[in-house]
Each structure stands twice: as structure tokens, then as C-alpha cells.
Image: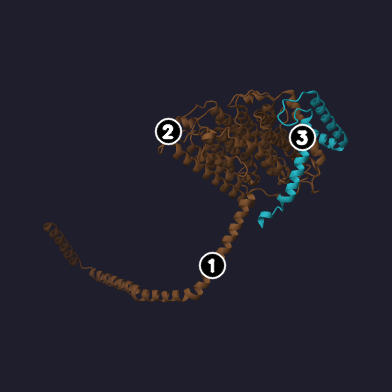
Chain colours: A cyan, B brown
Amino acid sequence: MNIFVRLIERAQQRGSLLKKLFGVCLGGIVCVGLTLPPEAGHLPGDHLPLFWSCFGLLGCLGLAGVCKWIAGMFLERDTDYYDH
Amino acid sequence: MTTELLVSHPSIPFVVGALLMWFVRTVRLRQAVLVAVPLVALMQLSHLPDTAGTFTYLGLALQPLRVDSLSFLFLHVFCIMALIGFVYSLHVLNPGTHGAALLYVAGSLGVTLSGDYVTLFVFWELMAVASTFLIWLQPTRTARDAGLRYFLVHSAGGLALLCGIILRYLETGDLAVVQVVPATAGLADYLIMAGFMLNAAVPPLHAWLADAYPEATITGAVFLCAFTTKTAVYALCRVFPGFDVLAVWGACMALYGVCYAIVENNSRRILSYHIISQVGYMVCGIGIGTDLGVSGACAHAYAHIIYKALLFMGVGCVLEMTGRQKLTELGGLYRSMPWALVFTVIGGISISGFPLTSGFVSKSMVTAAAAEAHCSGILLLLMLASVGTFLSVGIKLPYCIWFREPVEKAPLQTRQAPWNMYLAMAIAGFFCFFIGCSPDWLYRLLPRHAAYHPYTASHVSETLQLLGFTGLGFYLLARKLAPHDTLQLDLDWVYRRAAAVLQHWCRARAQQYDEKLGELYATRGLHHFMGVARRCATYDIERIDRFVDGIAQQVAGCGERIRNFHNGKIQHYIGAAMMLLFLVLGIIVYF
């Protein structure tokens, strides 16, 4: 398992390479998404190419933003809240 | 029939195993029992009869063993999960934990096999009681409190279920667990549904799950995450398929759980919220009610039990080794716990629905069912929940525990995890990939036939787009998503605050009444009470004491006379005996 640990440490040291690799993977996914015909539409716009890429990115940003905002505004309390 | 029932019912080995836990003192022998019991149950499954018949008890027709493809699917995964769970907990020395877990599994299997509501209710409550002990066995104050809340909430759910069963019996005179048609459903059916929904953690009846599971014992949480909610899913699948309200509720539930998981800091609470979310997919599939929907719900239940247990085992391993479960207190563990990282990531990509994993072939069945039924709103919610799932469990959880630099500079003190924990995780990880690579193996077990092929080029492409760009979103938001050491309010706030207010009110009122009573006693009552006490004392001295003293004097005099009668002269004794004899003879002759 030391090889696995060394691999992670090396990847952390070469952060820019990791980013490039991630970018290449995303590029590959986009290329495949552009070439394949989308399945029958069930959501507005899902017949468009790369709909699910946009859905994933915007959904992630939107969901994280909204959840953080709601939590910060209404839900977050100190950890000993129920002890008082 | 009784013999056949005892031999073939898979709950029996678990009950016997639980009894053995109390009597067997040798650790090795207990470990052997723990592995043998689920294996025996698995062997029993291959020889299960369709039914062990019906018998009458107190005038009620009971059917404690009924097997069809639906119950078989759940029995199968429950037994496999029991095996994985007991392997994971082999190092635990407390036989109480094992005993409670064995009874808990027995209850779950009993519910799955029951053909009537009385049997179902008995096993349902067995599950509730046994699972409470899996929380209480964690020796902390928070676990004690959370366990009590868990028990009270489940008691309320059990009460709703019991009311529904009684009403149904009064209305129809029938206790058989059969499918209810939405058009004919009445109050009794909806009460039963409420009981099932509480155990399935359907909002707003869900808060017990995220409250209790993170406080359970490490091995207890692994069992809890697999059985309670999935037994409820089985019950909903059996009785209420095709109820539209479940489809909408399930979709909302899927997103609700994910939203909380995104902002949560406690790793086991994140996973608990994800149980709510993933059970939402199942409830949604059941509500859609088509062959694909119900099959998708069952397939997802099967896959979910295993990968969720794997996630709980991975995080439990971290808790066992470091004593910590908050993301803000963890980090950089890839050096000391690389295997736990590997297995947790396998669980994480499975729950996210990556191709070649079990989540991909099961979750997509439910979304395909929603698409097939033209439920666009539901489909949108489910896909958004998929994004949130990958964001919170697929990326954030492993990143914060294993990769991110720890907030505290002092290195975490870790010990080597027991080998059995890794073995259990390896078995669960194997199933995640096996189901993902051979979906037909799972599809053959499904109760309804649904022609579905997950590995189409466009489906794989769409999934990779969704997950890949969610990963990009996390990369952009990594700092903003850093967890905070806070508590998130949920709907348990209602009853926890209500209980606190009630307690405060009662205490204040009780104090008020106590003070008033004391004042009244001092001003008015004391004089009267003293008078009554004086009269009682006089009566005691004048009457009772005199009466008692008189009796005592009489007894003493009588004793003195008897003592004088024993003068030691034999002729007096003979004379007295003869007189007594003549007296007796006289009486006999006279009568």
C-alpha cells in the first residue's frame, strides 16, 4: 500500500499535472457528448448536446450556493445548542 | 406446520444466535456463531417453501412465513448484509452488541416474511427495541439521549401502525398483508402508511435518523443503516405501490437529504442524510408504480444496502482508529489508512452512480421510470439529487477525511484497524462492482420483469457528463464548501424544543404549586393537623394502648396459670388425661 500512498503524495506535489489530467478527462467527456445523439427528451432542453454537462456544473454551483445560504441564514447553530 | 416453520424460518437462527451470545463466554466460539448464523440463514433461503401455512391464534388467521420474489430479494440482501456486518464486528467483545444486532436482523427478516399484520407488527416492534440498544450501547450521554428520542419516535410510529391494523381489521375482518389500491384506500391504510413512512424516514418523519445513527456504536450504525429503512421500503413496496403521493414525496426526500448532507460536518450524519436521500429514490419508484419503477426501487434497495454499509464501515473505521467523526477534526489520513480510503471511495462512486458500480445500474432504473412516466418535475429533482450526492459523498467526504490537510497541526493518533473490518469492506466493495458489472444477476432477482439496459452509450455519456462537471463545480467551490463545526437544525428541533419547553413549564408549575401548598400548610393546615395529631395520640394512649396492655396482662396471667399447672406430680397428669379422655368419649357417645 506504500505505493498507493507515494502515488497520492506525488500527485499532490504535481498539482498542475493533475489539473491538466482532469481537464483532459472533461474534454474527452465533452467530445463524446457532442458526437453521441442525446436520448429522447424528458426535461426541457435535454435534447441539446452537452445538456447534462451544463446541468451538472450549474446544478452543483446552484445547489451548493443555495444550501450554504439557507444553512447560514436559518439552520446553523453552535454545537451545544440543545444543551442550553 | 410448527416444525416446518421452525426449521425453515430464517429468523430462527438469529434468535438462537442471540440467546447463545448470553450463554457462550468464549470469544472464539461467539465469533464462530456470528459467522455461522447468516450462513445458515442463506442456506435456508435456498430451501424456503412458498408458505408454512396459516394457523389460528386467538381467533386470528396468522401467516408467519410467506415467500415470493419480492420478499426473497429483500431476504437475500438482508442475509448477505448480516454476514458482512457480523464479519465487520467480529473484534467487538461486548456480547450485548451482537445480541441486539442478531435480534434486530431477526426482526427485519420476520417482517419481510410475514403474511399478516399481527406477525408483521410483532417483528416490527422487535426491530425497534433491538435497534434502540445498538444506540444505547455506545457509552455516551448523547447516545443515551438520542436513543431515547429514537425509541419514543418509533413507539409513536408503531402506535400509528397498530391503530391502522386494528381499524383495518374492524373494517374488513382481514389481516393479510396485501396490496392496497389507491382508489379504495381509507384512514386505516393511511395510518399503516404513516407507520411505514416513519421507518422509511420520509420527511417530516425523518429527523430521528440523522439524530440517532451518528450516535450509535460503530458496528451498530452499520446494521442500522441497512435494515430499518429498507424493511420499511419493502413494506411500502408490498402494500402501497402506485400511490402518487409517494412519488412526489420520494423525489422531494431525495433532494432534501442531499441538501443537508452538503452543509453537514459530522461524517456519519452526512451518510445518515444520504440514507434519507437514497430511500427517496426507492419511495419515488414505488410511488410511480410501474414495473420499471417498482423494480428500480427494489434494485436500488439491494444496491444501496451494500454500498451504504460500505460507506458506514469506512467512516466507522476512521472513528474506531481516531475517535473522531467530524470533518473539521479530520484530514490527511491517506497516509495511515489507505485501505479505508479505497473502500470508502468505492462506496462513494457507487452511491453516485458511476458506470461499472451498483448505483449506476439501480438508480438509473428509477430515473428511467420517472422519464417513462413523463414525470418531468420528479426527474429534475432526482437528477439534482444525483449531483448533490456526488458532491457531498463522492468528493467532499473522502477529500475532507483523507486528502485535505488537517486543521489541527498535531498528527492524528491512529491505530491499525482489525483485519475483519477490512475483510467486511472488501466483501461489500466486491458486491458493488459485481452488481455494477453484472446487472443481469440482480435483475433476475427482481419481482417484476422490466426490460432495462443501463449500458447504452448515451446513458454512460450523460452520467459521465453529469458527474464530471459536478467534479468541476466542486473544484471551483472547494473553499466555500469547507465544513464548519456547527449544528444544523432539522425538524427534530420541533420535538426537542417542545420537550424542553414542556419540561420547563412542568418544572415551573410544579414549583409554584409546591410553594403554594407549603404556604397553605404553614398558615392554615398546620394548626388543624396538630389538633388531629393530638387527638390521635390521645386515642392511641387511652384506647389502643389500654386494649393492647389488657390483652398482654391476660396472656401473662394465663401463662402463669399454665405454668403452675405443671407441678411435676404424675398422678395429676394421669387424672387430667383420664378426665380429658372421658370428656372426649362422652362427646362421641352423645353425638
Q: Quadrant of residue B400?
A: top right
- Give the residue type that dot 3 points to: Gly
The image quadrant where one finds the N terminus of chain B is: top left
The answer as to whether the residues below labels 1 and 2 share one chain is: yes
Using the rendered image of the protein, determine whether residue B401 is visible from the camera's viewpoint.
Answer: no
Count of labels shown?
Answer: 3
Gap in Å between the C-alphas at discs 1 and 3?
A: 63 Å
Residue B289 appears left or right of B346: left
Disc 2 designates what residue? B55
> Where does residue B84 sit, x and y in percent of width and height?
63, 34
Q: Say few, some or many: other residues with alpha carbon within 10 Å of mark 1 (under 14 / 14 to 19 / 20 or more).
A: few
- Give the residue type that dot 2 points to: Phe
- Give the residue type that dot 1 points to: Asp
Residue B273 appears left or right of B236: right
Name the outermost residue toward the left. Answer: B590
Disc 1 designates what residue? B514
Q: Residue at x 73, y 30 (%)?
A: B354
Dot 2: chain letter: B
> Where does residue B530 sit, x and y in percent of width and height?
44, 76
Dot 3: chain letter: A
Q: From the image, state whether disc 2 or disc 3 is nearer to you.
A: 3
Q: Is residue B327 above or below residue B529?
A: above
Q: Secondary structure at mark 3?
A: helix
Gap in Å between the C-alphas at discs 2 and 3?
A: 55 Å
Q: Which mark is residue A56?
A: 3
Q: Is residue B591 above or below residue B389?
A: below
Q: Secondary structure at mark 2?
A: strand
> Where does residue B533 sit, x and y in percent of width and height?
42, 74
Q: Say few, some or many: other residues with alpha carbon within 10 Å of mark 2 (under 14 / 14 to 19 / 20 or more).
A: few
Q: Do the residues under discs 2 and 3 have CB atoms within 8 angstroms?
A: no
